[in-house]
Amino acid sequence: MATDKTFSVAGISKLNGDYKVRFANDMMRIKVLAKSGHEDIRLADLEGSYSKMEAAKIILGLDEFSDAIAQSTITEYIAENTPKAVPAPKAKTAPVKAPAKAKAPAKVAVTEDEDAPF
């Protein structure tokens, strides 16, 4: 849905047993939908221009669309068309190297000194 189109009328209609959310810019769309065989046409004037997602969210709260069929149709449309969040790319980190082992002190050969005071 990468479009800048806006709509001032939104609603639902039934065609061949399936309900769908409909968008238009004037109420005359009802005639076109009826002529095409749509039934249960319910459109609402939004009193402003909105994107499809904004319009769907607005009609979700209107009284004309408070029945179960309308609510499920609109909710399904919103769920299907909500942009999915893209996970942020993970920052590349350098592999952690194991710390270098400390070298053990070289073994010193101990010899007994004859002149030692002990």
Image (cartoon, grey):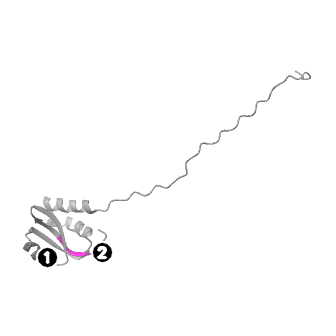
Q: Which residue is mark 2?
A: 4
The one of 80 and 45 positioned closer to us in this rendering: 80
Identify residue type, mark 1: Arg
Earlier in the chain: of badge 2 and badge 1, it is 2
Identify residue type, mark 2: Asp
Question: Which SS does the magenta portion mostly show?
Answer: strand
> How far apart are the alpha carbons under marks 2 and 1?
20 Å
69 is within the stretch colored magenta: no
- Disc 2, SS: loop
7 is within the stretch colored magenta: yes
The quadrant in which the N terminus is found is bottom left
- In this rendering, the answer to whether 58 lies above or below 116 is below
Q: How far across and how far down the image is residue 45, in percent?
A: 18, 75
The one of 14 and 95 positioned closer to us in this rendering: 95
53 left or right of 92 in image: left
Q: Which residue is mark 1?
A: 29
First to last magenta residue range: 5-10
Pointers 2 and 1 in contact (C-beta within 8 Å)? no
- Disc 1, SS: helix
The quadrant in which the C terminus is found is top right
**Rendering quarter of residue 86:** bottom left
Q: How far across and how far down the image is residue 25, in percent?
A: 20, 77
Q: How far across and how far down the image is residue 92, in percent?
A: 51, 54
Q: Residue at x 24, y 66 (%)?
A: 57
